[in-house]
């Protein structure tokens, strides 16, 4: 193991690691807290002090579980992303029993009132730990370089369901609680710990897949994701056996801040993917792909995040190529490139966060989050693939995954591996520039696509003044519509905004991918008839990818600046903490604080 320091954890590489945790978790909906007891064992006996990452946790007691002896501990707040729990007199201790309670403000957890759910009857809670929020749920070595197995008892109020990103291991009913048992037999990093509790039911959608959701949306969810098994088969053909046993899906309440989260055995998905036509399933392919790139081969620190996401975008598009063909991948890659150019423009093309391997010392990884690790990482891997050809690259990908399975690696380790397996290739594609320089290299791989050419043709017609284009766009793929809308110059006239409503059936569409670029365009154009729709959108959906551009568009226009603030003030209690922080920064309500 190479020596390196994770800038976001107190864990020091080379010191004893957590090996297994046995959790007993009680979900307390009266106080909005989790009351826990957890038994930790380590890969070797401890030395005299053990440091763990925590944030906003109330520690009740810590004991040496073998000798049943209380241990002294203290909390220091010197560390910038939370606190350090320092446990003393741990010489030769093998396992620890820690009792603790989360704060109602735990940044990983979102507690939803019944009104914020589909069923409106029962509250709901879920966790989102990536990148460094696991420490707000339980004390841990909150670095992706540390992996542990776990088992858990999850206690929830009667009538509710508790689920975890782990294998179910039975359940029982106690007096007023439902008790669910789980085990995660494969070692995972802390950021992949996840659970949810609420009124949740499930349905089989494949031999190793169920979809979980609130009963009101279960039918639609099952229908949307029914093709999941063929996706898993294609992925196995490309990347090797699926080792996590189950690939279940949990469709979240609309405030879930991400499109998807690759929690092992149980991917969390935004309900906005339920478009009714399976047009947005590339997100499922993405989360599935993480089962290899991310969950098997994991980034060692958040500075190496592109190893997770760049590789996963690459793998996602290989799966989509198998399922829908190269032409569709051309569209997806084009949308990705537009997102990348937007990120680089928003950050500035000479800035730290546009490097594939940025320096995140003292920075919150959430502030660095953008399309850069995803799409610049993807383009770098495509450049490498094209340099050596698929006949060499495909076996390389399989060997990479199998050689680093259940390991966490740095960018440097990855590049050493490429140099060993594909000698000469990294030099030819100017790897140093891709990895270490800001902005984009002068020439980046492109993707020919007749679907996209068609979009450009219709754009030309639009520019020339033609407006009766409904027959041209009628049979378009969703992604063609997205590209048409997002590539229109802004602002557009009010008349044209109205024409676009008709052209893309904006009044009736439930497809949020089409809705978003339209709403951004309307906001930038000051097109008032659409404001009510923007209000509804921002008050029901908490997906970061939508909130950020839409608030940015509203904020960038003098006439809608007030609306942005008004809507944010009104809706912020409904957003997950990561979405709230991201929007606050866009609206300039909070300076980017490196110490946060
Ligand atoms: N792992 C990410 C989500 C994430 C990243 C959460 C960093 C917290 C910190 C997930 O796999 C992801 O990339 N989701 C994307 C969708 C994907 C299709 C690009 C998203 O949510 O937009
Ligand atoms: Zn991802």
Image (tube, rainbow, N blue to C red):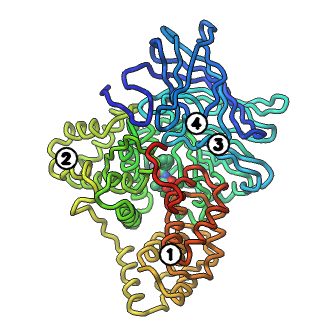
Q: Earlier in the sequence, mark 4 or mark 3?
A: 3
Alpha-carbon distance for marks 1 and 2? 44 Å
Residue furthest top as drawn: 67
Q: Which sits earlier in the primary sequence, circle 1 or circle 3?
A: 3
Q: Residue at 64% across / 70% down in the picture?
A: 535
Circle nearer the viewer, 2 or 3: 3
Neighbours of disc 3 within 10 Å: few (<14), some (14-19), many (20+): some
The answer to whether residue 329 shows anywhere in this view is no
Instruction: Name the residue that disc number 2 marks.
Output: 426
Residue at the spot of label 4: 136
Instruction: From the top left corner, tell me how far across and down residue 571 is, in percent.
Output: 65, 60
Marks 2/4: CA–CA distance: 40 Å
Looking at the image, is mark 2 or mark 3 earlier in the sequence?
A: 3
282 versus 431 height, above or below? below
List the residue tagged with mark 1: 557
* Quarter of the figure that contains the N terminus: top left
Distance Cα–Cα, label 1 vs label 4: 37 Å
């Amino acid at each position: 193991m190479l020596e390196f320091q994770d800038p976001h954890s107190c864990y020091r590489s080379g010191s004893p690691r957590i090996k297994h945790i046995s959790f007993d978790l009680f979900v307390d909906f009266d106080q909005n807290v989790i009351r826990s007891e957890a038994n930790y064992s380590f890969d070797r006996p401890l030395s005299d002090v053990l440091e763990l990452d925590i944030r906003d946790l109330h520690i009740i007691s810590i004991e040496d579980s073998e000798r049943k002896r209380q241990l002294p501990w203290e909390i220091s707040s010197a560390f910038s992303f939370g606190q350090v729990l320092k446990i003393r007199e741990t010489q030769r201790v093998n396992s620890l029993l820690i009792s603790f309670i989360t704060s109602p403000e735990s940044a990983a957890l979102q507690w939803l009132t019944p009104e914020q759910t589909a069923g409106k009857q029962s509250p709901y809670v879920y966790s989102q730990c990536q990148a460094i929020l696991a420490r707000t749920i339980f004390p841990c070595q909150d670095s992706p370089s540390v992996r542990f197995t776990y088992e858990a008892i999850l206690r929830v109020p009667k009538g509710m369901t508790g689920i975890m990103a782990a294998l179910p291991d039975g359940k029982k009913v106690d007096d007023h609680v439902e008790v669910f048992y789980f085990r995660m037999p494969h070692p995972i990093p802390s950021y992949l710990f996840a659970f949810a509790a609420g009124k949740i039911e499930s349905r089989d959608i494949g031999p190793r897949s169920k979809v979980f959701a609130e009963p009101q949306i279960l039918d639609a969810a099952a229908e949307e994701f029914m093709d999941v098994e063929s996706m898993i088969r294609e992925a196995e053909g490309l990347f090797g056996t699926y080792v996590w046993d189950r690939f279940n899906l949990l469709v979240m309440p609309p405030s879930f801040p991400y499109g998807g989260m690759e929690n092992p055995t149980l991917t969390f998905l935004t309900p906005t993917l339920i478009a009714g036509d399976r047009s947005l399933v590339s997100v499922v392919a993405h989360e599935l792909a993480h089962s290899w790139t991310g969950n098997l081969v994991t980034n060692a620190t958040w500075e190496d995040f592109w190893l997770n996401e760049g590789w996963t975008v690459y793998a996602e598009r290989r799966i989509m190529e198998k399922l829908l063909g190269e032409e569709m991948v051309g569209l997806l890659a084009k949308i990705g490139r537009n997102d990348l150019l937007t990120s680089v423009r928003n950050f500035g093309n000479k800035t730290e966060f546009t490097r594939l391997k940025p320096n995140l010392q003292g920075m919150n990884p959430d502030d660095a989050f953008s399309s850069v690790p995803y799409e610049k990482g993807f383009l770098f891997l495509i450049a490498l693939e094209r340099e050596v050809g698929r006949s060499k690259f495909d076996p390389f990908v399989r060997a990479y995954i199998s050689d680093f399975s259940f390991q966490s690696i740095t960018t440097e380790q990855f590049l050493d591996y490429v140099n060993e397996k594909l000698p000469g290739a990294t030099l030819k594609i100017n790897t140093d520039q891709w990895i270490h320089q800001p902005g984009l290299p002068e020439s980046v791989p492109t993707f020919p696509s007749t679907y996209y050419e068609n979009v450009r043709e219709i754009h030309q017609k639009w520019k020339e003044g033609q407006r009766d284009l409904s027959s041209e766009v009628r049979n378009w793929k969703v992604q063609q519509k997205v590209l048409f809308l997002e590539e229109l110059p802004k602002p557009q006239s009010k008349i044209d905004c109205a024409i676009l409503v008709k052209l893309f059936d904006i009044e009736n569409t439930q497809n949020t991918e089409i809705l978003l670029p339209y709403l951004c365009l309307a906001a930038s154009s000051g097109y008032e008839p659409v404001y009510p729709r923007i209000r509804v959108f921002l008050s029901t959906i908490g997906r970061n990818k939508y909130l950020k551009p839409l608030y940015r568009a509203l904020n960038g226009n003098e006439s809608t600046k007030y609306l942005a603030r008004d809507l944010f003030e009104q809706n912020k209690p409904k957003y997950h903490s990561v979405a709230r922080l991201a929007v606050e920064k866009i609206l300039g309500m909070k300076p980017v604080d490196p110490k946060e």
